[in-house]
Amino acid sequence: MMAFLKLLARNQLALAGLIVMGLVVLLAVLTPILPLADPDVTNTPARFTPPFSEGALLGTDHLGRDLLSRLMWGTRLSLAVGFAAAFIAATIGAAIGIISGYYGGRTDNIIMRFVDVLMAFPYILLALAIVAALGPGLMNALIAVAAVNIPFFARNIRGITVGIAHKEFVDAARLAGLSDAKIILTEILPNVLPVIVIAMSTTVGWMILETAGLSFLGLGSQPPQADLGSMLGEARSALITNPHTSLVPGVMILIIVMAINLLGDGVRDALDPRLKSGALSRPLPATLVARDRQPGETADGTALLQLSQLETQFHIGPRIYRAVGGVDLQIQPGECLGLIGESGSGKSVTALSIMGLVASPPGKITGGSVYYRGEELVGAPYELLRSLRGRKVAYIFQDPLASLHPLYTVGDQLIEAVRVHRNVPKAEARAHAIELLKSVRIPNAEDRVDNYPHEMSGGMRQRVGIAMALANDPDVIIADEPTTALDVTVQAQILTLLDDLRRDRGVVILFITHDFGVVAQLCDRVAVMYAGRIVEQGTTDEILASPAHPYTRRLMACVPELGGGRRRLEAIPGLPPVVDKLPAGCAFADRCDKVRAACREGNITLDEIGATRRVRCIAPEIEEVPA
Amino acid sequence: MGRYILRRLLSAIPVLIGISVIVFAIMAMIPGDPATAILGSYATPENVAELNRDLGLDQPLVQRYFIWLGNLVQGDLGRSFNLNRPVLDEVLERFNATLILAGTAFILCSFLGIAAGVISAARQYGFADKAITFAVLLGISIPSFFLGMMMILIFAVNLRWFPVSGMWPIYGTRDIWALIDHLTMPALALAVVATGVIARLSRSAMLEVLRQDFIRTARAKGVRERGIIWRHALRAAMVSIIPVLGIQAGFVLSGAVYIERVFQWPGIGQMLVDAILRRDILLVQGGVVFVAACYVLFNIIVDVAQSLLDPRIKT
Amino acid sequence: MKLLTMTRRALLAAVAASALAIGANPAAAQTPPGVLVVGQVAEPQALDPHAVTAVNDFRILMNVYDGLVRYASGTLEVEPALATSWEISEDGTVYTFTLREGVSFHDGSAFDAEAVVFNFDRMLDENHPYHDTGPFPLSFFFSAVEEVEALDDMTVQFTLNAPYAPFLSNLAYPTGLIVSPAAVMEHGAEFGRNPSGTGAFVFEEWRANEAVVVTGNPDYWGGAPALEAVVFRPITDANTRVAEMLAGGIDMMVEVPPVALSEFGGDSFQIVEQAGPHVWFLILNALEGPFADVRVRQAANYAINKEAIVNDVLEGTAAVAAGPTPPAFAWAYNEELEPYPYDPDRARELLAEAGVENPEITFYVTEGGSGMLDPVAMGTAIQADLEAVGFDVTIETYEWNTFLGRVNPGLEGEADMAEMAWMTNDPDTLPYLALRTDAWPDQGGFNSGYYSNPEVDALLEEARSSTDQDRRAELYRQMQVIVQEDAPWVFVANWVQNAVTNDRVEGFALEPSFFLLLHDVVKN
């Protein structure tokens, strides 16, 4: 609850809405004890007194009644009506929706047909007919307005319930022999409640507007009772001559509805779990750069791609996650470098930081440099970055289903990849796309080119992903766990394919993985990452033969080596540290079986332990690599 | 696809019958009857009974319903008691006007709403986003009839840019320009609320889509930001925007009831309100069923559009 | 990016289009001379005078059709129209009319005695071949007619089943207008959309909810009208109607909302007023509850500040009513009658005398309806006045048709007080239908408050069957005194009907009958 309020308070607009709404509600509650004129006492000779006159701050209406007083009492009533209508509609609508969604089948069919019927009916006419049938009065207007909104709630809630009704925990509850009623109350309801609250909060304003609308059509509260809608409706006839009588309730409606909407948005955002992760922000075209520290070292002339002291952080609320904490990497032409680590170690963020593809906000490059052929990419103009993306440095992503656009054919997406950088005719680009598909060994490429991603298998999709990366003959391919989502045989095929391509085309590959087996098959060199930093680096052979860092050793023990027979399989106890509170010293200390006091003191540097080896450990597994 | 459309059309029939039953039942529940409405002050029980007999309203309700249904099948919606003309003629004439108004408003709110939402999302937290968010909030918080009346006061009475009301000039040519002249204000007033709703939804749909992996892929390909927004993100966001357009179409149609009254647009919304108030059962019945049929049809079109847009949906 | 340029182009086109539209139509509303555009309150139901009931429709019909007789300008007294003269038999049951020669309907067919017979038989004879072109809701106006006969081409005779004094007056009412038999035969039930009469204007076209256009009839027997054409525009919303008037979209509007009158104070508009045969009153339930006591009924009459309602709520668009008969029936109105004064103290005294200091009453108010003026505001003001002297008033508001459905069957067991208003064409109509003992709701009348006074009953019966106007006037004056004293109603207001025209319109006057006669109107 506190967290919810905090989240709400963080959203300035919602806070403004909350404050305004709080004021309005407070005034409405206090109305009976405020020194206001009687809202119903008429004084016809003093009708249409302008605002700010003696004794009537907001003037008087067409019967000489005090507008301020009527406004306050009217607000009170309208708020009550709006909330009550929203509550009634939400309760009944949700009940119908849950029952329909939970039971499904014929029940669902019949109820939803009925809801369809009601929704196809122009709602205002339905409200009109209900009011005409029930007779006059605000109460009946309330019922009418609530009734016409029930179908919307029902349909909305049903959709969500259907999604939940087939989740494992519901099946489990069912198997455990719980009654339907109990399942609905204890398993389903808590899960749809946030949605109901969200829908309700956004509907309250709408309800007030609708009662005002009914009043406009001549069906509202009983005189002399004031509600905002009927005040507006009654004042309407004097709109031209005495606009203030319409403006007073009109502006109040505006204020309330705006405040409720702002607040509703805030509530929705606060209840939406995704916002907590800061994920509801739109990523900018390129990662923000806020280098408060010096850029890294200057470029090494020989490296094709060089990362120097690269730091990338995620700023979520008051927390700062140091996902990448000063990474140095160099990739020479023709090389394949493996970047390995557990999930959460920062390897993917490192890879994405290279071309500024880290989602931003919340991501931010806060330090260091990335050089491509000696050219600084961090903080480079967006246009330069864009022109290099896909043309010189291409990416292959992990989940080929999610990373391909679901609504375009693979052909279209390949063609686009080509035409973004080269102004070639469409037909030519299409021929090229087919060539690309062939080069990644997709059979019937001519037909496949017109397939949508969902029509292909996982392996095929990843081949398309690779083809797309190859579209402009890039110098560097950054492959971010390209085989993780695939099953083992397909994995092997893809690796073979990448290996072949690398040899045929001389393309540099930065291969991100958590699997030493994969590294062994493909990479020349390996860098091991832990908690945002490189902990060990060296040639594949060296590291496989003699891991220097305890973490590397443990990591290797976790995976079966491809073709290497069964090895000890053991998980590393504990979890990687949360990168917003990194411990001093070695981040792996808590999980290390060789931990000692010195491990937790001060920064531990990445020391050279051989021509090609570096390790970040005060007590490496091996002291020195023989030259 | 053809079979799918046919199936949808067939499944609309029970919906429409359901609507007609509800309308009939509600109209029967409403106190007062057409005879009272026609006779006004002269509605003595005697006169009412006689007029009801003349109108054929003395038969039992259920029987009247089936007579109506039977005639409907033959394309006869009966005669309006009040207007003394065939319901179908009146409905078609009025619906035509509503279609022009609501159709224009719908196109306006779709384009403006989506554009505003997309721009807002693309410039999240920027000035444009804040300005649009505020305008949208203002738009969805103003009762449309109030807005309409204000527009009349400002733009028609004071500035004289547009005519106050009506659909065509009383004298002069009835060409497209004359129509646009009369249509501008009511269509805008009608579109405002729906524009706001669509803009809000488009914004959040776009934000949702922009976080997806395939957008990152497109960026990694070097696609320009415009292409990212309008080609990649919007296309995917449309999948969740289009169903809302379908719902908003219903709201626009309902909102037309107010706007038609304020701007004296000769549409079906105003006709239906009058018909309900005058207890003109057959006119209400015919009008509502017709409107509902169009709404259902429109939703089928929306679903078809949806399935054309999204190849993953099987029809 | 393609999409963007496209939308940008579309936007430009739209802007250009609307700019053109504005440019092509500078200050859109300037109606041409000779064409009068009238803002009406609603779409007409039909243009068949026998089939409609609304004053709104009568405004059009009176210009397209003529009756056998009509009200002389500025009065409610009958004068010749399509009949040049008539004779009434001694016993008051046979009326013989001599018809005007050389008149033809707009469709070219001739007006003669057979046409008159056709008109009334269509309405009254269930076996008439064109009776099914109805229904004819107001045909009971002529329920006294037993037979209509063509004595010769130009003479027609009506035989009544009993003497019925308001007969001539009813003939002057729109229900007595004469339609073209040929057009009825041609169009059948669609006649209401294809009207043909003998009037000063010829029906031209009807665009649903947009306009009814009529053009001047050059061959009109009363001389061709000055106007080329009249366009009747229905504008339901009063605000929009006022806005159209201000913007110049219409030349004339009727039923100007009281609060809007001040908008038309300048030289470019003129306001026309005319008191009419209208009375706005509160029915009191004399059968049961507090109003069963005449003192409480009188207390209500004293308690309500009618001056304030008439002058402030209605901005002078009505006058205080003294009794059940409006002053517009000058010949039958009792000039000596003084309205109940506003005297809250007297009201409290009367309540104390009656022994009910704080009577609880239920008050039916309508949202609006024919002749109801501003019923919600008036009802609210009345409630406030009554509460000030001790009544405890609960308002129940109903939409007009529901309201009628509740009030007309009688207030017994439902309410103590209800708003009501009547516009009639004869001083007989209202009291006869709403104040007699035999007019209690269970007998098909409108006496919803169950007022009963044998003296009044006798006076009304006699007045109805007397053919001598002076005698009738005498009887009505007596009736007014008694009814005022008995206070079965609270007499509140007589509507002073208004209309606004712009400065291009000349020669327009409102009639006490509330009809809109445009024959002599000129537009520059």
Image (cartoon, rainbow, N blue to C red):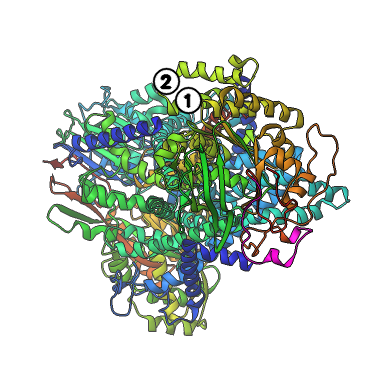
Q: Main secondary structure of the magenta part?
A: loop
- Marks 1 and 2, how far apart in space? 8 Å
Residue flagged by tag 2: what amino acid is it?
Val
Q: Which quarter of the figure has residue A588?
A: bottom right
Q: Chain of mark 1?
A: A
Q: Is residue C498 visible?
A: yes
Residue A387 in magenta stretch:
no
Residue C496 appears at what percent x and percent y? Answer: 27, 58
| A226 versus C387 height, above or below | above
Discs 1, 2 touching: Cβ within 8 Å: yes
Front-most of residues C198 and A92: A92
Q: Chain of mark 2?
A: A
Residue A606 in magenta stretch:
yes
User: Which secondary structure, mark 2?
Assistant: loop
User: Which secondary structure, mark 1?
Assistant: helix
Residue C174 appears at what percent x and percent y? Answer: 33, 41
Residue flagged by tag 1: what amino acid is it?
Val
Residue highlighted by disc 1: A418
**Is C137 on the left-hand or right-hand side of C316?**
right
Residue A221 appears at what percent x and percent y? Answer: 49, 62
Magenta segment: A590-610
Front-most of residues C197 and C330: C197
Residue highlighted by disc 2: A424
Q: Which quarter of the figure has residue A467?
A: top right
Q: Is residue B65 visible?
A: no
**Is A207 on the left-hand or right-hand side of A615?**
left
